Amino acid sequence: MIPRLLYLPASIGLALLVLPLAGLLFKVDWPRLPSLLLSPEALQPLGLSLATASVSTLLCLLFGVPLAVVIARSRPRVAGLLRALVTVPLVLPPLVGGIALLSLLGRGGVLGSTLELVGLRIPFTTAAVVLAQTFVALPFLVIAVEGALRTAGTRYERVAATLGAHRGTVFARITLPLVGPGLLAGTVLSFARALGEFGATALFAGNQAGVTRTMPLAIYTAFNGSGVTTDQAVALSLLLIAVAVIILVLVGTRRASVLS
Amino acid sequence: MTAALCQDAATAVLAANLQLTRGSFTLDVQLTLAPGEVLALLGPNGSGKSTVLDLLAGLATPDTGTVTLDGVTLTASGRLVAPENRTIGLLGQEPLLFPHLSARANVAFAFRVGGARLKTAEARVQADRWLDRVGLAGLGSSLPGALSGGQQQRVALARALAAGPRVLLLDEPMAALDAETAPFIRQLIREQLSETGTSAIIVTHDIVDAVVLAHRVAVLHHGALIDEGTTAAVLAAPQNPFVAALAGVNLVVGTAQNGGVVAPDGRTFWVRPADAAALSPTTPASAALGAEAAAAVFRPASVVVHTVQPRHASPRNVWSARVTGIEPGTGGVRLRTSGDPEIIAELTPAAVADLGLQVGLTVWLSVKATDVSAYRR
């Protein structure tokens, strides 16, 4: 029972999401597409993006899952505070995140000057790319997993404890499998967010080919670059969309097989 | 008194002295559990029954008090031993089977993490053996979602016992089951507790649970134990309206014989056919043991009162007794009649007047066998 009046705004909303992507397809220079995508200018950023986004996602899992557990099992007031802190990077413009990272770790930054003393320089390295991606992607994972943990509740964990299972065993064999779908969703979201990260990376890591030029930065460079046609940018965008669709399809089939 | 308490606590598997205040609710409970004993904790909703179980299991901490198991202190001014190290099991209303694990894996989990600490392969073998014991042979590979509520509760019982608890806490384990499934699970719990010799505390507000499963009954009301004793003794002299409502049934605790229940005074109560089979000796071995303990339960409203001996009447249970009391009841007038145990009949005030009933009069009572349910104890 859907009120008919809703169909009109619903269609406009869908068109708003789909039409620009469809428009992109019309701009693609199909005959030249293979050569554009197989050029070093395309493959190098793709490889860097996949590598850095994978490492970022791993970091998100490593630090985000424990953080989600702590939030989900804290008393309401503490949990509320922690949740607010985690959400801040999510609502910040990524550019602000980049400036914040620079303020902390950049030359003359609070932590950056200390690191410099031991010969460590993070800004404008591949490590900076990973850090920027983790900064923007971590909230997605934490929020997804924390929600799943709170939905699952503690009843199964309590039962497992009365059976004699120690906390580590309960976490690995009961808690994690119970939040499996939420964990998967959070992982996909944070990987996708890391893959598309632009603003914080541009400020904190720069745009050096082969070191910090990920796909979004390559697209920006191709689009703005002197003498380079927008064809390269369109082709790279298409590639990024393809990667996203492939991930969603893979996850979709995985989830379907888990449910059946 | 103090000496008696100490001795009591020394022989007890579990001894607890618990105080807790939460808002306007205050809990103050002392209880002990003897080896192999099953204690029924009766009480209305909100009386603190589940809180007592949580405190015993270590899932909550009392303000003050102690819990000792086999002489080892688990709780004293705060929690000393975590739930996973207590060997106190818990079976609740809901089976809470781990949804991502098969029935076999659920039970095997308890074998691996519980007292037995079995290796994976051996745990699976033992799990199958337990599923067989609770009547679920061949369903080991099923995920909980594919099992009925009763089947899930069987798996949960097997899982709880597979952990090898010293004491099993049962929190209304039949409450979420339908009326047809509950008796089977109740009987299964009775058998398995007795076979494994597990001491248990069962929280319930169903008198049948107390009658079938428990050796002893304690009544909890507003956070305090107001009555304690054998099931029959507690029900015979209700100390509060809740127990009186529970005791609003006629309860005959006796022995099973030829499909009937023989009361302490020798009267035989014939029971409905469905239950009569359960009262017959199940195996030659149990027949050799002689009379088995059993209980018959029927509603006072099912008892028909006659002033003359009924002839050619259809009810199988007909006996004469003396009226020992006439008092107002919830559903009319309650007529107390002599015998061990005394039987209560419920009539309308008009019927009492019509029949000219008064204390001291000898009357004839009858109950249809189909109105009498029976349980092995």
Image (spheres, helix red, strand yellow):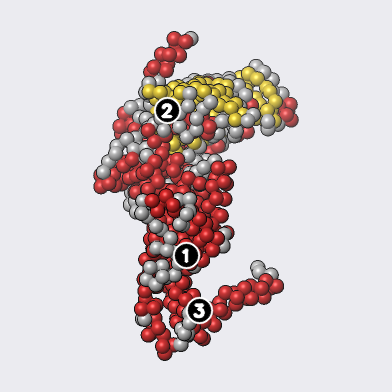
Q: Residue at x 37, y 55 (%)?
A: A120
Res. A201 mark: 1
Q: Distance between the residues labelled 3 and 1?
A: 17 Å
The quadrant of the rendering that contains the C terminus of chain A is bottom left
Identify residue type, mark 3.
Asn
Local secondary structure at mark 1: helix
Res. B57 mark: none
Local secondary structure at mark 3: helix
Nearest-to-viewer mark from 2 and 1: 1
Q: Determine if marks 3 and 1 fall on one subunit.
A: yes
The residue wearing badge 2 is B80
Q: Which residue is drawn at 61% across and 29% down?
A: B25
Q: Which residue is drawn at 50% across and 30% down?
A: B61
Identify residue type, mark 1.
Thr
Crowding near pointer 1: few (<14 within 10 Å), some, many (20+)?
Answer: many
Q: Determine if marks 2 and 1 fall on one subunit.
A: no
The residue wearing badge 3 is A224
Q: Distance between the residues labelled 2 and 1?
A: 50 Å
In the foreground, B93 or B363: B93
Does residue A214 sit above or below B274 in this rendering? Answer: below
Q: Do the residues labelled 2 and 3 touch (CB within 8 Å)?
A: no
Crowding near pointer 3: few (<14 within 10 Å), some, many (20+)?
Answer: few
Asked if residue A148 shows in the view, the reply is no
Does residue A115 sit above or below B48 in this rendering? Answer: below
> How far from the left and from the top, in percent, is residue B21?
58, 27
> How far from the left and from the top, in percent, is residue B9?
42, 17
Read off the chain for label 2. Answer: B
Identify residue type, mark 2.
Leu
Q: How far apart are marks 2 and 3 (CA)?
A: 67 Å
In the foreground, A126 or A167: A126
The quadrant of the rendering that contains the N terminus of chain A is bottom right
Does residue A241 sit above or below B76 in this rendering? Answer: below
